[in-house]
Image: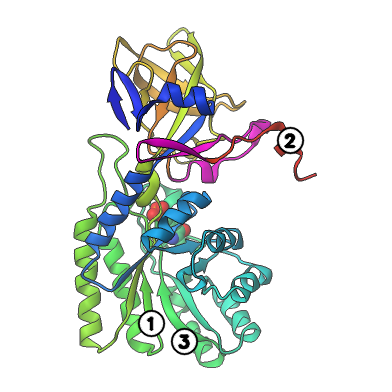
Amino acid sequence: MTVRDNKVFFGDMSANKLTEQFGSPLYVYEYDTIVRQYNRLQEAFKNADTLIYYACKANANIEILKIFNELGAGIDAVSPGEVFLALRAGFEPERILLTGTNLTEEDIRYAVDNNVPVNIDNLTMLKEYGSLFAGKEVSIRLNPDIRAGAHMYLETGHRDAKFGILKNDLSRLIALLNKVDAKLVGLHQHIGSDITEIEPILSGLDFMLSLAKEIATIRFIDIGGGYKVKYYADDSETDVMELGRKVSERFNTFCHDNNRQLKLIIEPGKYLVSEAGYLLTTVQSVKRNYNKIIVGTDTGMNHLIRPALYHAYHEIVHASRFEGETEKVNIVGNICESADVLGKNRVLTRSKRGDVLCIKNAGSYGYSMASMYNARLLPPEILIKDGTARSIRRRQTFEDLLSTY
Ligand SMILES: Cc1ncc(COP(=O)(O)O)c(C=O)c1O
């Protein structure tokens, strides 16, 4: 995104021109930003034998997946549907890891039949996996009992979370591993999202390494994702260089001291795509109420649920007149819910019907969490590469509302 002539531009087209051509609302992704973020992580973890598995729940558009395949990434999938998309995007099955929660036998069979490794979340499933797929390799998701993450819904590695095998189940795990006919090749954790401190991730790593020491068949350690990006200029972010340095150092020391050759896997989602994405929306009304000015738009919590779900902050800028006389407003959507607020108390250039606004950090958990609530249609997605825009998903039509009947 750049600002020229007081307007927001993507490549050589203004936001206004893009919405004229592709319609509004509109998701816009910048190829260069995705590549930049990927390269940053590669650089940060270059001292260890590291694989980057893109957590595609963040944005599973197949054209985005293809970019990561070209970059050499693997895929962290959480459902058979994501496995399907990753395979269709061209990923080798062995570069995909299915880490589901409460997977059915059918879900697991889909992965196994397609030679995609499965990461098991609980002991019941591990037992079943051993009897269904005797002799097959498997990895397990551990819950290291660590609180990390920016919101209670973003914490996934503590004792009250539904994810992973807890420390107090370790003796049962070891007993089961001796009985079950499955070869344990990997240990995994994902303790939360928007984590800025490095210590919790290192503690989880230590926990996994202590277990790996006892299990000779372990080939990889997966420390999960959860690295935070800035949502506004002075916001905090994960220092991925320091994270990479510290994790690599600890990991390499373990491998050296124990004469092991392990692979390190990281599973970032947001870090790779959040800043690459924008949601363009058009102002429909401006209400000057008693003590609030309410700017109404043609998108809402159906297209970007993060503000309503996590009270997440997404910076919103005026794309038609970047600077001008400002006022404090609430920016809301077109969904019949009071929670349908995209930004509260924002200082924004005075708006009028037809102006285009640009919501930032919409590349992760935007479209992928979008719904057709209120029978509102899903917007198109476009990719900006080499300065030009290309459609990578069409806008839905009313016929899509009938397509599953
Ligand atoms: C298993 C797993 N790995 C990785 C991620 C990626 O998290 P983030 O997008 O915060 O990096 C998630 C997100 O919930 C996850 O559930």
- Residues at circles 1 and 2 in contact by the CB criterion of under 8 Å: no
- Determine whether 28 is above or below 43 in the image: above
* Residue 275 on the magenta segment: no
Task: Please give the residue where the numbered disc 1 appears in the rendered image.
Answer: 219
Q: Position of residue 37 (x, y in %)?
A: 30, 51
Task: Please give the residue where the numbered disc 3 appears in the rendered image.
Answer: 174
Task: Please give the residue where the numbered disc 2 appears in the rendered image.
Answer: 399
* Residue 368 on the magenta segment: yes
Which residue is most to the right? 405
Is residue 401 toward the left or the right of residue 35 in the image? right
Q: Earlier in the sequence, mark 3 or mark 2?
A: 3
Image: magenta residue range: 364-391
- Determine whether 150 is above or below 323 in the image: below
What's the CA distance linking mark 1 and mark 2?
48 Å
Q: Position of residue 123 (x, y in %)?
A: 55, 77
Q: Determine crowd level at label 1: few under 14, some 14-19, many 20+ residues with C-alpha closer than 10 A.
A: some
In this rendering, the count of numbered labels is 3
Give the color scheme: rainbow, by chain, secondary structure or one colour.
Answer: rainbow
Q: Nearer the viewer, mark 1 or mark 2?
A: 2
Question: In the image, what residue occupies the spot 36% across and 69% down?
Answer: 265
- Residues at circles 3 and 2 in contact by the CB criterion of under 8 Å: no
